[in-house]
Image (cartoon, helix red, strand yellow):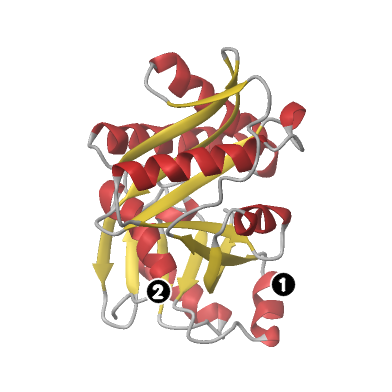
Amino acid sequence: MDVTSPGILSDLIFLRFGGEVTNRGKFVKVQTPDNPDYYFGNLLILPGPPDDVAKVVALFDAEFADASGVQHHTFLWEPTARLSTAAKTAFTAKGFFYNHSSVLTAQSVHDDRHVPDGVSFRKLETDAEWDAALDAQMTLNLDNHPREAYIAFKTKQFVQYRDMADAGLGGWFGAFKGNKLVADMGLYFDDTIGRFQSVETHPDHRRQGIARALVQWVSNWGFLHRPGATLMIHADHGEVAETIYKSLGFRETEQLESLYRPPV
């Protein structure tokens, strides 16, 4: 099976660096042996939307039979068609969560907004800065996941992000008020695409234009360091973040769907 979706190919920037991507012919298997709790690092990429819960769960279980730490189920597919209403109902009835994201791209961004007073931006370099970003990302999302598994997953994920930064593939960036990290995000590259990761703002500093200004600043950093690259960001379809990115000049190029089920 050939992966042709630009959005999925951008996922593979990270999955190939930290994991194993294997073409099984009729589907693609992705495994991250060092991070079995990574839902979207241990998954099957299908040629189209699934329609039989038992069939794809059995396929997943067979593929990951030797990976005892992988207790979830995750499926992503080429956007050849939308998941049917009947299939969505069947999967969610079995405990799956459905994701619908917009893949947005830009080759330039608007620089038409004032940077919030007292806010500065920089690429993270020190241990303390990286630790602050990891702590912020975990704190903001911990309530939505099993605690111990999420901490293990996020810690290992940030080790990879820093390794990728050290390899010259991009980096992690922060918005600061004084020395306090108030928002952060990543940007990493392959030959032609720069893919954003995990844009987050501390709850006490939201609705101040900080996230928009950070994305704008990081975008311009990306264009400066990788001339000619296309920047890409995945946003929950129809949510506020998508509107913010579009206001900067990002435009939707495709929509992706996925299903995942936490360990049961």
Measured along the vertical axis of the image, is residue 67 above or below residue 211? Answer: below
Residue 64 appears in view = no
Q: Is the C terminus in the top left, top right, bottom left or bottom right quadrant?
A: bottom right
What residue sits right under mark 2 in the picture?
Answer: 5
Q: Indicate the secondary structure of the residue bearing disc 1.
A: helix
Q: Which residue is drawn at 47% across and 83% down?
A: 48
Q: Residue at x 65, y 19 (%)?
A: 118
Q: Where is residue 214 in the image (x, y as percent from the top left)?
A: 56, 37
Residue kind at label 2, given as amino acid type: Ser
Q: Residue at x 42, y 62 (%)?
A: 43
Q: Do the residues labelled 2 and 1 touch (CB within 8 Å)?
A: no
Image quarter for residue 130? Answer: top left
How many dots with numbers?
A: 2
Q: Earlier in the sequence, mark 2 or mark 1?
A: 2
Nearest the viewer among 53 and 167 is: 167
Q: Residue furthest front?
A: 112
Q: Where is residue 108 in the image (x, y as percent from the top left)?
A: 46, 55
Measured along the vertical axis of the image, is residue 129 above or below residue 42? Answer: above
Image quarter for residue 85? Answer: bottom right
Closer to the camera: disc 2 or disc 1?
A: 2
Nearest the viewer among 112 and 219 is: 112
What residue sits right under mark 1 in the picture?
Answer: 93
Nearest the viewer among 59 and 3 is: 3
Q: Residue at x 22, y 36 (%)?
A: 167
Residue kind at label 1, given as amino acid type: Ala
Q: Where is residue 263 in the image (x, y as percent from the top left)?
A: 57, 53
Q: Indicate the secondary structure of the residue bearing disc 2.
A: loop
